[in-house]
Amino acid sequence: MLENNMASGGKGDDQDTGSFKDTIVKQLIVLLKNFIWKQIERRSLGNAEMIRKVLDTPQLNTPQMQKISRCLQAVGDQVDGDVQSAMKDQTMRPSLENYIKVVLGIFSDGEINWGRVVTVFSFTCLFVLKAYEDNIFDMIKNIINWTVDYFRNTVVNWIRDQGGWVRNSLTNRV
């Protein structure tokens, strides 16, 4: 039931805005980990099952969560070329400094939209893949945490204002 509540933006029985924000963040973690795993699996970019284990990727148990995941993958396919080009720079190693530089660049004009949200997901995926290829498994968890922290501090309220993960224009794309 929690997953259904989260997918609808946490509205309903949940009156506490603090726990509303927490539910959006919990859903973010599930969606981000699934996005990374699915991108790597679909494109044969690495050992997807090993990465899934390192990420401790949860299953998507509801049709709503599965639909959101498909939407994120579809948008990710559209923005992937730009992210791949940026990541070809061999100096772009997984580090907090590089992560901050790229993510702040994505939102440099202060505008948030679903395309940019998914661009961060795609960038995070490629950073995770680089850490995996370099056998820096502890870094993978750090990269996920950096993304979650950034979203918690900067993007979660915007997602809430869009009606959550389900009630938005993103799910109308698939």
Image (cartoon, grey):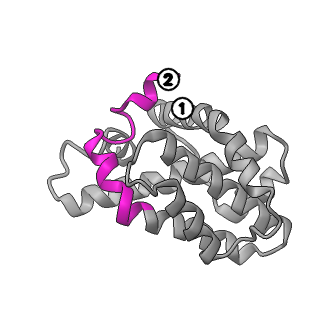
The residue wearing badge 2 is 173
Residue at the image position 32 percent from the left and 38 percent from the top: 8
Can residue 160 be seen from the camera position used here?
Answer: yes
Whichever of callouts 2 and 1 sits on the residue coming sooner in the sequence is 1
Q: CA distance from mark 2 to mark 1?
A: 7 Å
The label on residue 115 is none
Q: Position of residue 16 (x, y in %)?
A: 17, 59
Q: Quadrant of residue 171?
A: top left
Q: Is residue 65 above or below residue 57?
A: above
**Residue type beneath disc 1:** Cys
**Residue 162 horizontal side relative to residue 59, left or right:** left
Residue sitting nearer the eye, 147 or 97: 97
Is residue 125 found inside the magenta-colored segment of the image? no
- Which quadrant is the N terminus positioned in? top left
Q: Secondary structure at mark 1?
A: helix
Q: Are marks 2 and 1 in contact (CB under 8 Å)?
A: yes
Q: Position of residue 136 (x, y in %)?
A: 78, 75
Residue at the image position 46 percent from the left and 57 percent from the top: 108
The residue wearing badge 1 is 71
- Assess disc 1: are there few (<14), some (14-19) or many (≥20) residues with their C-alpha within 10 Å of its C-alpha: some
Q: Secondary structure at mark 2?
A: loop
**Residue 74 horizontal side relative to residue 90, left or right:** left
**Residue type beneath disc 2:** Arg
Over which residues does the magenta segment extend? 151-174
> Mostly what secondary structure, the magenta segment?
helix
- Assess disc 2: are there few (<14), some (14-19) or many (≥20) residues with their C-alpha within 10 Å of its C-alpha: few
Q: Position of residue 70 (x, y in %)?
A: 58, 32
